[in-house]
Image: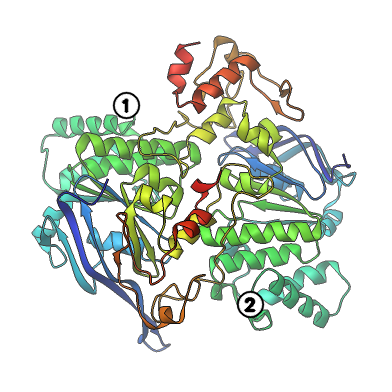
Amino acid sequence: MTATGRPLVEVRNLAKHFPITDGVLGPIKAGVVKAVDDVSFDVISGETLGIVGEAGCGKSTTARLIGRLLEPTDGEVRFEGEDITKRKGAALKALRREMQMIFADPRASLNPRRTIGSTIAEPFAIHGLEPTEAARKQRVRELMDRVGLNPEDCNRYPHELSGGEHQLVGVARALALGPKLLVADEPVAALDVSIQAQVLNLLRRLQSDLGLTIIFITRDLSVVRYTCDRVAVMYLGKLVELAAGEVLLGFPRHPYTGALLSALPVPVPDPLGVHRKRELLSGEEPSPADPPSGCRFHTRCPKAQPLCSENEPPLVDKGGGAVAACHYPLTREEAEACSPLAAP
Amino acid sequence: MSEPLLNVENLRVVFNTDSGNVHAVDGVSYAVNPGSTLAIVGESGSGNSVAALTTLGLTRGERTEVSGRILFEGRDLLALPDRELREIRGNEIAMIFEDPLSSLHPVDTVGHQVMETILAHRAVSKAAARDRAIDLLERVGIPDSHRWVEAYPHEFSAGMRQRVMIAIALANEPKLLIADQPTAMLDVTAQAQILALLEELQQQLRMAMIIITHDLGVVAEMADEVAVMYAGRIIERGSTEQIFAAPQHPYTWGLLKSVPRLETSRSEELVPIPGRPPSLIDRPSGCYFHPRCPYVRDQHRRVDPRLQPVPEAPGHVVACLLLPPERKRLWEGLEAGRTPEELRDSQ
């Protein structure tokens, strides 16, 4: 799927800087962490957009900025064409009906002293919907059924459920108000392998049944082809590549995307290690408080040239439906060398 | 074939809790040869970590009942007094854990923590131990290690902390390293670095490894042999090639088919394993997997399967009551993209 169709969300030059404070007698501003720095992209109505990157790349901050859980330092987030970054009060509350989030740690996002039925019904109470008890109960049962929970379990407490079921409760609660956009922040990272599939299958089914638009945050590239239409890759607060899932995995253009693919352990035994030459990144991710000049990846990039430390590469079309921010993008040969899919 | 370095025989670990007896490990046997890697795969609560912790005597306690034998170079670790076990632990057998931050002492320098392990087992001077600590940190890939030796754990990234843990584990050149989900908390690029480091060190030291993980990618990359655990038991064991090419147990199939792979496309459907792992206090009758098994028959609810050799696959054993030709048909069907329901109905 390519980037055609009406954008539901337009992110423009979005930035979030967190101050670092120091000092014994009181906070002194010691610097800023540029968690998200000048990021722009669209989310097309009805698609699943993946945002991939490692810890500290700014993917969750981006999700929280879009979900208005954080205020941006700069830039705009337009939802259905309207900037939502300045919304307050009733206008913000109305926005919450349109977009909902689910989180990585499903148990921590449930109140342990509330039954799951009352957790799922809470959005109705907050927004003054479904005033009668009977109607609310009926809706809760429908929601539980839709996500694959047994409606009979509505009087149970979170500790009586498994980790996978916790996440299903999170999804049911997020769907209660019929949102257009669901922001899923690493929804299966904390789940055991056998139940990840339940949640991933559900998200996909919801998208086709309800026409939901999903932003799927993950650190695991192996799930993106299955879950996402398009994938954005972030590194140190910057968007470095954006392409359709198939394109990104088949022919990554940014050397960082290539390195992520190359690092992925693949469940196909390779006793002699002949199929794949691993391109291991050397060193550590630099601090986002003091990012490298020019291209932020140049300190670890196998293809870095002097230009890379001087000029920041713009995000431009590299052909084949991919945009990437790189002066010296991977050639097809280099891309194949790091992609496990190219292994014979 | 050489004599195994570690031989676990019919290990049982029962925790006596207020809610009842938890049968965490229920008759587990495996062997690890010098220089080879065994992966123990299973979901949380399947007993894989408890089996490993018991090897090091870390589950000893008033309310724990342990039986069976754990032979390390012929000595039964279960029979050793604490004092003698301490001489082996951190010396001949070392362990690294999932969360390096909570395994390191927060207000002690990493250099001192490496030295401590050396001084506990070697009669060397502090200066010599410090030099060795610097060497070890260098060897696990910490640059400028003479400077970092004075640093505290909070000054390191997660990947670097795991390198420190590995330096501590390798301080006395152990013969066996037990790695309990060593990369579960790391990003893929740090994970790739750590796995490469472990492989390299293993070759240099001819060290055996037990890796506990549920990441099948890590298994394929690292292991020579794989043991799949479910509800405190090993339900399938074989070489890595056997387990990936011709897995025999429906639970193993579930693990392989429920995880999206890089090549899984948008049009395919993942096959979740229905239900959840059983309580280890009140275990199911018959085959422990029967409440979740899509191919269950009446007999499976009554008969408890034992590990049996897989025909024409030396070293491959499975505890499943389905007959070998039936298992072959089911796995081939799953590989061809058919669902468990379709396969069950066509039998």
Q: Residues within 10 Å of mark 2 (few under 14, many from 20)?
A: few
Question: Tell me, what colour scheme is on the image?
Answer: rainbow
Do circles 1 and 2 both sit on a common chain? no
Chain letter, disc 2 residue: B
At 62% from the left and 25% from the top, the residue drawn is B248
For mark 2, give the secondary structure. Answer: loop
Quarter that holds the N terminus of chain B: top right
User: Which amino acid type corresponds to the residue marked 2 in the rendered image?
Assistant: Pro
How far across and down, in percent of the image, does residue B284 sit? 57, 22
- Of A89 and A228, nearer the camera is A228
Chain letter, disc 1 residue: A
At 84% from the left and 59% from the top, the residue drawn is B87
Residue A162 at least partly seen: no
- Which residue is labeled 2 in the image? B143
At 59% from the left and 32% from the top, the residue drawn is B280
Pointer 1 with pointer 2, Cβ within 8 A: no
Check the image and report above or below for B44 versus B117: above
Quadrant of residue B68 within the rendered picture = top right
Residue A323 at least partly seen: yes
Task: In the rendered structure, find residue A152 and report the number of the disc placed on it.
Answer: 1
How far across and down, in percent of the image, does residue A233 sit? 37, 60
Quadrant of residue A135 within the rendered picture = top left
- Of A63 and A344, nearer the camera is A344
As drawn, is B265 to the left or to the right of B88? left
For mark 1, give the secondary structure. Answer: helix
